[in-house]
Amino acid sequence: AQSVTQPDIHITVSEGASLELRCNYSYGATPYLFWYVQSPGQGLQLLLKYFSGDTLVQGIKGFEAEFKRSQSSFNLRKPSVHWSDAAEYFCAVGFNNNDMRFGAGTRLTVKP
Amino acid sequence: NAGVTQTPKFRILKIGQSMTLQCTQDMNHNYMYWYRQDPGMGLKLIYYSVGAGITDKGEVPNGYNVSRSTTEDFPLRLELAAPSQTSVYFCASSNQRGEAFFGQGTRLTVV
């Protein structure tokens, strides 16, 4: 069955520290892969996407993600976190153009 | 640029009442979606549409209905509101490559 898993419900990092948010999916083929960010009371904003080609993709706000086919993973990274990065992050997987599934989300807290 | 617009932003319904959540997009996207978001559960797909006149069920369609008479509009109908439908509802549209654009959400409480 198609599924998206974000193993970490809540992560706390210190400002300036590096960040990695995990995402795994279950699917027989390579899907479209996305990371979205949601600030409190807001809709979702696209951070970055992977469709094909280079497995390391760059997004907005200094984020990047790496697709690893062998691990069925698409982890989000940022080298140095800012206080304004505190939000909820969702991994999403497009299994075809009609069906996009979301992970449960990871809430990021940034300590001063 | 309006993007995806949802109305209303907030609503309180009594059990058994009905209502329609409105969604419109101005990007000429064929694909549109309705999701509900519950704490710790991520977004669950309710219904989606691949174009005017075509709709299909997602993961959690029970208790909801949709229609798609135009490319721009994709309203979500709750016929008999239940407390289990208390949630935040998001409408989205996507381009051919699956990049989704979301509305600001509708917070619905059923009491």
Image (spheres, rainbow, N blue to C red):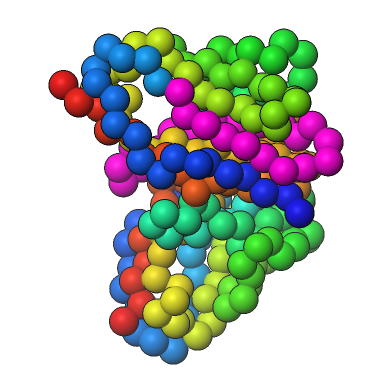
Residue A36 x %, y % = 50, 33
Q: Measured along the vertical axis of the image, is residue A21 above or below residue B83? A: above
Q: Measured along the vertical axis of the image, is residue A43 above or below residue A19? A: below
Q: Nearer the viewer, residue A50 or B46?
A: A50
Q: Measured along the vertical axis of the image, is residue A68 above or below residue B35? A: above
Can the viewer see residue B106 in this picture?
no
Position of B66 with respect to A88 (left or right) is right
Q: Residue at x 39, y 87 (%)?
A: B15
Q: Nearer the viewer, residue B33 or A47?
A: A47
Residue A26 x %, y % = 72, 43
Can the viewer see residue A33 in this picture?
yes
Position of B83 with respect to B36 (left or right) is left
Q: Residue at x 44, y 82 (%)?
A: B82
Q: Nearer the viewer, residue B66 or A7?
A: A7
Residue A49 x %, y % = 62, 24
Position of A46 with respect to B51 (left or right) is left
Residue interval drawn in magenta: A20-42
Q: Measured along the vertical axis of the image, is residue B27 above or below residue B21? A: above
